[in-house]
């Protein structure tokens, strides 16, 4: 059974006099003053058919606070479990008695989805408006990339990933069907050896090794397909449906990896980026190239911040859309949040185009400053050169916001698996960042 909160624990709260302890105290007071946050989180954390019996699990309040603490302090689940047991200030903030395990924390925190975190962020922004901290009248927009938790993809490494995961699945099938009998040849060591040789080989020998690795991958895939048919042919399968679906998804990804390797290595074809698989563990990963910089593997984010430094909005993009195509949608999202478009907008030169300038002006934006003019006249963007310089200086501050999000709040690399969890990770980091910013502006009394 899960409750929204456990009020008795608040009597035992203690926050140390250190700056971080007082910031946690200020954030705790702010969360208590906004009960709608718990209502939003309870919708995903408390199931409608939950029985009012049994042992109490972590409360909704504790789960939300533990999630924020994890992102604010840049902790892993293992580290979070330790600090909740070791630190009185952390334990008081999270309102947790005892020391929950890392698996308990992970299973609870991962239930909060991106939409819930986004709605929580809107409540925080509404508080900032009431307190006069941020009104969303002057905003700056920029893009960055958050990487997924994958290794740099190569054709040989992807094939080896396919083989070793398929061998893992085949081992599970063999154990499930013993003693009825299901045997296969473990080609994992051979595939790994070929992959290692490919890394240090050049020329025609490399192509030959790729062919041998492709053969091993196809043979392992055939064994797995036989095992899948065996599972589906049994009336009462010893394996759950979810495991069968996982095998089917793995076979599909393996076929795509084999296809792209043949096209790239054997046929010399340039495979379009939208057809490529860069990871079988995070297949949603996009290939991002910003300007002339290195290739990054993850998702592009468009971020809107205000004068206070608060993150007003963040959008996880699909693919690698041009910045020019995302300016107007990001301003429209500000209208949905505040009920009006910003009066002034400052953006990077990558968003600059005459069509964008005309459209944002038509939407009601008074001053739209593009850091690089790209043929646009200052008089058409803003009302004076002085305003243009001020907005360009203001725009530079978004780089500091993004740097802080990446260094302190984990937006450089997402360690959660799956696209839904990726979005939840981004939004939870954003909420943690905003709460810490507000704690620094208005500390606890």
Image (cartoon, rainbow, N blue to C red):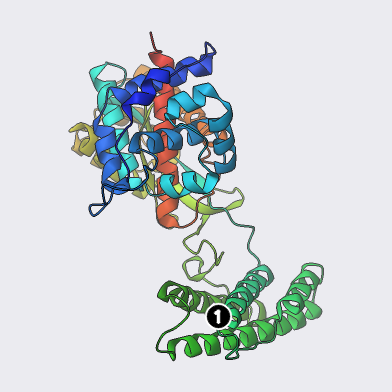
Q: Is residue 90 above or below residue 412?
A: above
Task: Give residue 129's position: percent from left, percent from top.
Answer: 25, 22
Look at 41% across and 32% down and name the residue there. 65
Q: Nearer the viewer, residue 161 or 56?
A: 56
Q: Nearer the viewer, residue 87 or 213?
A: 87
Q: Is residue 384 above or below residue 219?
A: above
Image check: 236 left or right of 381?
right
Residue 185 occupies quadrant? bottom right
Q: Nearer the viewer, residue 409 or 379?
A: 409
Furthest residue in direction top, as rendered: 445
Task: Give residue 262's position: percent from left, percent from top.
Answer: 61, 81
Image check: 335 left or right of 174?
left
Look at 59% across and 37% down and name the residue there. 79
Q: Is residue 166 above or below residue 42?
A: below
Task: Give residue 347's position: percent from left, percent from top.
Answer: 39, 34
Task: Give residue 384's position: percent from left, percent from top.
Answer: 32, 20
Look at 44% across and 25% down and name the residue there. 93
The number of numbered badges drawn on the structure is 1
Residue 434 occupies quadrant? top left
SS at badge 1: helix
**From this viewpoint, is residue 155 visible?**
yes
Residue matched to label 1: 176
Look at 56% across and 25% down and name the residue there. 87
Residue 419 occupies quadrant? bottom left
Q: Nearer the viewer, residue 224 or 161?
A: 224
**What quarter of the picture does the C terminus occupy?**
top left
**From this viewpoint, is residue 142 visible?**
no
Q: Is residue 173 above or below residue 326?
A: below
How many other residues sit within 10 Å of disc 1, few (<14), some (14-19) or many (≥20)?
some
């Amino acid at each position: 059974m899960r409750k929204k909160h456990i009020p008795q624990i608040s009597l035992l709260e203690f926050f140390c006099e250190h700056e971080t302890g007082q910031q946690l105290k200020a954030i705790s007071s702010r969360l208590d003053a906004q009960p709608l946050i718990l209502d939003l989180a309870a919708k995903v954390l408390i199931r409608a058919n939950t029985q009012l019996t049994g042992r109490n699990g972590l409360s909704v309040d504790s789960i939300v606070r533990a999630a924020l603490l994890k992102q604010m302090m840049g902790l892993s689940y293992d580290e979070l479990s330790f600090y909740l047991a070791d630190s009185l200030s952390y334990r008081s903030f999270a309102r947790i008695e005892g020391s929950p395990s890392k698996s308990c924390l992970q299973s609870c925190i991962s239930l909060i989805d991106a939409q819930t975190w986004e709605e929580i962020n809107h409540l925080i922004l509404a508080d900032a408006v009431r307190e006069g901290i941020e009104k969303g009248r002057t905003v700056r927009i920029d893009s960055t990339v958050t990487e997924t938790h994958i290794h740099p993809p190569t054709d040989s490494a992807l094939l080896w990933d396919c083989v070793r995961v398929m061998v893992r699945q085949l081992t599970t099938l063999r154990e499930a069907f013993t003693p009825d009998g299901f045997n296969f040849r473990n080609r994992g060591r051979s595939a790994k050896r070929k992959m290692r040789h490919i890394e240090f080989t050049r020329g025609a020998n490399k192509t030959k090794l790729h062919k041998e690795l492709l053969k091993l991958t196809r043979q392992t895939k055939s064994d797995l397909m036989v095992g899948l048919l065996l599972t589906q042919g049994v009336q009462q399968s010893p394996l759950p449906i979810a495991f069968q679906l996982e095998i089917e998804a793995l076979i599909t990804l393996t076929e795509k990896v084999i296809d792209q390797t043949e096209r790239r290595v054997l046929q010399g074809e340039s495979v379009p980026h939208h057809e490529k698989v860069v990871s079988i563990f995070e297949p949603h990963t996009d290939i991002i190239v910003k300007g002339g910089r290195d290739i990054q593997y993850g998702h592009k984010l468009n971020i809107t911040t205000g004068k206070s430094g608060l993150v007003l909005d963040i959008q996880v993009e699909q693919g690698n859309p041009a910045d020019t195509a995302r300016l107007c949608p990001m301003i429209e999202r500000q209208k949905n949040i505040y009920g009006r478009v910003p009066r002034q907008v400052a953006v990077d030169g990558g968003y600059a185009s005459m069509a964008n300038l005309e459209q944002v002006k038509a939407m009601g934006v008074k001053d739209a400053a593009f850091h690089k003019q790209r043929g646009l006249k200052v008089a058409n963007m803003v009302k004076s050169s002085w305003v243009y310089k001020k907005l360009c200086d203001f725009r530079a501050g978004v780089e500091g916001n993004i740097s802080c999000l990446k260094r302190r709040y984990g937006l450089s690399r997402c360690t959660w698996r799956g696209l839904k969890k990726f979005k939840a990770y981004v939004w939870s980091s954003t909420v943690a960042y905003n709460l810490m910013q507000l704690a620094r502006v208005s500390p606890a009394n």
